[in-house]
Image: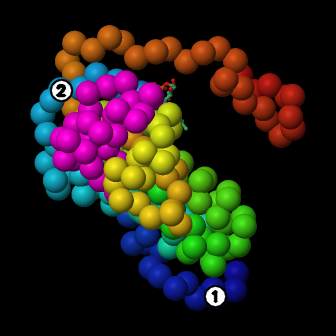
Amino acid sequence: MPDVKRPFDITLLSMFFQHQDMNVLDAIKKRVAVRHYESKPIPEADLKTLAWAAHKAPTGGNTPYRRVLIVNDKETVEMIRKVSPGFLSNAPAVVLIYTDLDVAYKGLGKLGRDTLSMIDAGAAAENVALAALELGLGTCFTKSYSEVGVKEILGIPENYRTEIMLQVGYPAKNAPPPLKAKPGGRITYLNYHGNRWE
Ligand SMILES: Cc1cc2nc3c(=O)[nH]c(=O)nc-3n(C[C@H](O)[C@H](O)[C@H](O)COP(=O)(O)O)c2cc1C
């Protein structure tokens, strides 16, 4: 074996990844779209943690085009609800993930502006949804809203595109059970398309 110089201490790095408290699979298992919330407000520190989780998602070409806007002002949330047919809950807060299109285009051209930034936003949104569980919060991805309306309400300039919103709050105790996944969506293949892997 050649003596490869590593830029970091591999022992420390493996200890980091073996952190005992980390249980990502549990969080993935628990995550469902929550559409019934308690009215209890969310501490600002926890909302900041959600913003941090969003920003921790990968970014195409390490290009800083992602923006996160947290809304916890009651009246503003209500205004957003009014322009969002897909906002079906009484969530007390919203996390909006959006893109500075100029930064995306300057850094990565059309691909960055039209595709990568949207993929990133999905990754950021799922980070928010999983981090929320650790804080006792539920979320619901929301894309059915008026882009023009939401931008107007939040004062977002022309050269930005909203990607996805998450409704956020403490799940109501007596909420109806979450919807079951429709059959036909969970298909995995092994090595080549068509080779079903059950
Ligand atoms: C891109 C995207 C957009 C969505 N938009 C909405 C929406 O506008 N309103 C809503 O109630 N749910 C929305 N959802 C949530 C889906 O309906 C939900 O994830 C799906 O029914 C599966 O249920 P589960 O999340 O509980 O597994 C959206 C999900 C995704 C990924």
Q: Does residue 148 lie above or below 139 as drawn? A: below
Q: Which residue is disc 2 drawn over?
A: 38
In the rendered image, the vertical position of residue 180 relative to residue 52, given as above or below: above
Amino acid type for the residue under numbered disc 2: Glu
x, y percentage for residue 43?
Answer: 14, 48
Q: Residue 57: percent from the left, percent from the top?
A: 48, 59
Residue 61 in sight: no
Q: Position of residue 90 (x, y in %)?
A: 26, 27
Residue corresponding to mark 1: 3
Tell me the residue at 32%/11% (across/down): 176
Residue 98 lies, with reference to residue 65, above or below; the image says: above
Label 2 SS: loop
Give the residue displayed 17% in from the left and 55% down from the top.
Answer: 45
User: Which range of residues does the magenta coloring cover?
Assistant: 69-96
For the residues marked 1 and 2, what is the alpha-carbon distance in whole angstroms? 58 Å
- Disc 2 beta carbon < 8 A from ligand 1? no
Per the image, label 1 sits on a secondary structure element best described as loop
Q: Position of residue 81 (x, y in %)?
A: 34, 34
Mark toward the viewer: 1 or 2:
2
Q: Is residue 119 left or right of residue 99?
A: right
